[in-house]
Amino acid sequence: MLLVFIMAIQIITLSGCWDYRDINSVALPQLGAYDIHEESRSGTSDLPQEEKLVDLTVVIPNLSEEVKAKFRIEKTPGLLIGNSRGQKPYSSPGDYSPAVASIIVFGEDEAATGLNKLNEALSRGAKNPHTVNYSVAEGRGENILRVPTDDYSTMGDYLRLLLRSSEKRGFIPSSTLHQFEVDQNPGKNPVMPLLIIKDEKVMVNGAAIFNKDKMIGKVGLKETQYLMMLRGIESNGNLPYILNKDGKIYDYGSLSITNNRKVTMERNGNEFTFNISIILEGGLNEHSSNVLFTQNKDLRKEIEDQVTSDITEGCNKFIKRMQEEYKVDCIDISKYALAKWRKELQPTIDQGFIENVAIKVDVKMKLKSIGELN
Amino acid sequence: MKDKAGSTISSKQLIFLIIGSQIGIRLLYLPREITGIAQEDAWLAMLIATIVPIVSLFLIDRLGKRMPEMGFTQMSQALFGRFFGSILIILFIVYVIGFESVVVRIFSEVTKLYLLPRTPLVVIVFMFIFTVVYAGSKGARVIGRLNELLFYLLLVNFLVLMIPIGEADYTNLLPVGEAGWDGIGRGVLIAAQYYAGIEILLVFYSLVNRKDEILKAGIIATGITAVLYVVIVLICESVFGVAGMQHQLFPGLVLLKVVQIPVIERLEFIFLFFWMGMGARPAINMGFAASLSLTQLLKLDEKKYLPYLLMVIGLAMYILALLPPNLLTVFDMARYAGYGFYVIGIVYPLIYLIMAFARGGKVKQSA
């Protein structure tokens, strides 16, 4: 019995010998940026012109309290991400472990070349979480990392709060590694938040549109709003409205809105018609006129009608742009066709399908609350 | 032979024992394997495949009812004679060693990949085999209780696996039936292999107290396994989609990496911590069954020699588990081992039953 006990203790502790690591010596990047390596971009790298190196820039918090800087920024080039990580031992002491990385920012140029090859290291590494948030930067991703953040410990902290579950705070798509992977399935395409630097501050300025793993376009904040509603990403956001009468503005204000989507479809031979019903619900935040709701019973309906009209018009414009310019399904409706005729449609769903379908939008707005004031 | 190899087990414990022998590490990769064949209809294939273990259960029950007090070894030798009976027993033991060494290797690979990347595989495999030998040496009653305890942990783990349901998209499950009879049929053939473990009843039948409850217990156990299997396939399909799932080696585990829960940042590590016991459990059950059969075949005192023979079987599993050069080869081996289930779970009881009918009263005499 004693022998068994000693053996058991030995076996249990045995594994610790190999996998033991001092936490202070581990480099745990919080945030990473993937960009095309500057030299290979300009054609001066040793690599063949058609194969561009990637720059991996990471923000690593300094765990020791004795050092002055809260974090350090490290940049290494490589063939792909794993290779870039492999260059770290030459310039950075300690073990590099991306297990707690929570944000990846892709440079615009890199995103346009296709991200699947960069995703490999993140998906294949068993330690990496699939909840890491994805975003695209206008210009180079590393520039985002270098913006000073006086109010937050690191840019990683700031971006994590900005991007994680961003749809709950505004009409901002949040995208994760898992969602990106799922959006590589037939009939699907990812969208990601688009980051810019403005007045020395990083902010969301719209969304990046993808054809599978390649970025093909970007839309501003207003269009992102329509994209979110059409795509059925349930969000909480702020919508302004303006009421006109006889060419004059008589009331304006803003609403807190939640959105929902229902999709039905019909098929007549090779003609597909999608009916997207967008349901908006929310409450009044503020309005400019002194009109009391109890005195003007129509005001509530007028606000609802105006918002309905604005959103319908915006959605239809977005659909037109999607079908004529992007030519990819970025509103995630092809899946409803696949759900009925998968075998028949799957081989061609990503080639010329979305451009040739009819998409009808029906918006229903319900102003459920006017708050405490009349 | 009763009350020698760690006493008898109740029919309730038999339920846990069968579930414990069926559900192990395979739960984490079966959605990929089945959807690879039956596409969106994988869950349907998984459900239809329950027919195979039920047939196996029915055959073993019929066989056991004819010779209720005979163990697998005595039964084999009584029906087929000492020579051929011994060959059948040895083949059963070889099957168990082969099948469970694959299970141990896959579980060790998962442990290495996710938890102990720098620990050599030989050490991890040794840790598992040590657990198998130690638990198995305590006898049938302890194994029964261990399975019961681990069953409740399995339920907790299963609830954890349900957490990513918020990421599910029902359209990934549609349309139903598009794989056709061919796709679903081939899916059923593979899916049925994941119910391997029911054949443990060949050995445990004689150790159960209430023989009249065995069929019911087996149906309940297979039913529970089927529900867990079908649900995990449905969740994986709806979260990843069929095409996306093919990129994951262990979709059941990656499932836990797609959600984030406050405080528990990395759900998969918590899950794996509890799954440790579940991974070793089929090997414990089947390893015990094999060593019991070997002890009886060699006509040794079970109480005295069973732990030693379990060590021999454990050593064989250890060597075999380390033989494949990589995980992909192990997956190939797992497929072949899965076909072995048809032989041991269906063909064995069938030919035993035919022989029992053919020999009629002579068997009772020789018993």
Image (cartoon, coloured by chain):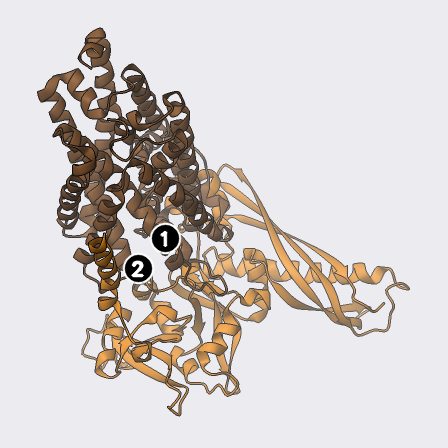
Chain colours: A orange, B brown
Q: Residues within 10 Å of mark 1 (few under 14, many from 20)?
A: many
How many numbered marks appear? 2
> In screen coordinates, is A345 left or right of B303?
right
Name above or below for residue A254 compared with residue A318: below
Residue A119 place in picture, x, y as percent:
33, 64
Which of the chains bears the disc numbered 2? B
Q: Amino acid at mark 2?
A: Tyr
Farthest residue toward the bottom?
Answer: A68
| Front in this rendered view, residue B258 or B89 | B89
Provide residue B222's location: percent of width, then percent of height. 39, 32
Q: Is residue B164 above or below residue A235?
A: above
| Distance (Cα) linking label 2 and label 1 | 10 Å
Q: Is residue B244 above or below residue B68?
A: below
Image point (49%, 78%), residue name: A158
User: Could you tell which of marks 2 and 1 lies nearer the N-terminus?
Assistant: 2
Asked if marks 2 and 1 touch (Cβ < 8 Å), the reply is yes
Please provide percent x and percent y for residue A268. 53, 37
Q: Is residue A199 visible?
A: yes
Q: Which mark is residue B114?
A: 2
Q: Quadrant of residue A50?
A: bottom left
Q: Which mark is residue B253?
A: 1
Q: Quadrant of the C terminus of chain B?
A: top left
Can see residue B244? no
**Residue B78 horizontal/vertical position (percent):** 17, 17
